[in-house]
Image (cartoon, grey):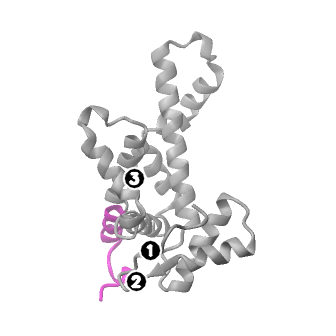
């Protein structure tokens, strides 16, 4: 087994970049398709982005990419990681000193409609990037047993809305877990 301590710094950087690059590209494309930037390319990319996030395929796609990004974030210099995020999402200029000064000082009344649309798009991309960062921080790698999966699902439901103990207990009865690490709901879930 190869350990990170036995490889050169150049090989380590290449490994970490490989972990980061493709997982981050996918996150950017999914964010862009959510913002309808891929409309001209047909519905296939929108369908792929939708399937990427669904509960059925989440464990085999999205969660693995999030784990790769988390691993890269731990192994990389934090400044390099954030710079990679800003660069890939195309918002690096917005956060630079000159870009931030222009965005703060310019009033919306003096901007053209195209400039306002670009600014809205840039803000939406920043929002998606921040959403990804929040997911990287709050989602630890996937649970490995049924109890942890139920606990995670219940916590996610509690974030959405306050629930009574009886509602949570009913909800946990609807969750099943099979050998292939797939989460299923038996019947109609009372909290959806």
Residue identified by numbered label 3: 27
Residue 60 sits above or below residue 40 on the image: below
Residue 185 sits above or below residue 93 on the image: below
Q: Classify residue 178 by image quadrant.
A: bottom left
Label 2 Cα neighbours within 10 Å, binned few <14 / some 14-19 / many ≥20: few
> Which segment is the magenta one?
1-19
Total numbered labels: 3
Residue identified by numbered label 2: 178
Q: Earlier in the sequence, mark 3 or mark 2?
A: 3
Q: CA distance from mark 2 to mark 1?
A: 8 Å
Task: Check disc 2 and report its element: helix, strand or loop.
Answer: loop
Q: Where, quadrant-wise, is the N terminus in this rendering?
A: bottom left
Q: Earlier in the sequence, mark 3 or mark 1?
A: 3
Q: Nearer the viewer, mark 3 or mark 2?
A: 2
Q: Which mark is residue 99?
A: none
Q: Earlier in the sequence, mark 2 or mark 1?
A: 2
Task: Check disc 3 and report its element: helix, strand or loop.
Answer: helix
Most foreground residue, 28 or 47: 47
Q: Residue furthest bottom?
A: 1
Most foreground residue, 82 or 154: 154
Label 1 Cα neighbours within 10 Å, binned few <14 / some 14-19 / many ≥20: few
At a point 43% along the width and 69% down the height, the residue shown is 67
Q: Main secondary structure of the magenta part?
A: helix
At a point 38% along the width and 66% down the height, the residue shown is 56
Circles 2 and 1, Cβ within 8 Å, touching? The answer is: yes
Q: CA distance from mark 3 to mark 1?
A: 25 Å
Q: Position of residue 4 (x, y in %)?
A: 37, 79
Residue identified by numbered label 1: 184
């Amino acid at each position: 087994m190869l350990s990170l301590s036995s490889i050169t710094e150049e090989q380590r950087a290449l490994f970490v970049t490989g972990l980061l690059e493709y997982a981050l590209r996918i996150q950017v494309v999914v964010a862009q398709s959510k913002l309808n930037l891929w409309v001209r390319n047909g519905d296939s990319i929108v369908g792929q982005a939708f399937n990427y996030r669904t509960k059925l395929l989440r464990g085999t796609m999205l969660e693995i990419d999030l784990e790769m990004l988390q691993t890269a974030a731990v192994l990389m210099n934090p400044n390099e990681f954030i710079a990679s995020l800003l660069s890939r999402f195309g918002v690096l200029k917005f956060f630079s000193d000159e870009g931030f000064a222009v965005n703060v000082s310019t009033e919306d009344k003096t901007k053209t409609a195209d400039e306002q649309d670009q600014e809205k798009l840039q803000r939406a991309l920043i929002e998606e990037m921040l959403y990804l960062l929040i997911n990287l921080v709050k989602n630890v790698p996937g649970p490995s047993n049924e109890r942890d999966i139920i606990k995670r699902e219940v916590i996610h439901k509690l974030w959405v809305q306050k629930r009574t103990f009886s509602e949570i207990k009913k909800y946990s009865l609807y969750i099943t877990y099979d050998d292939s690490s797939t989460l299923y709901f038996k019947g109609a879930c009372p909290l959806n």
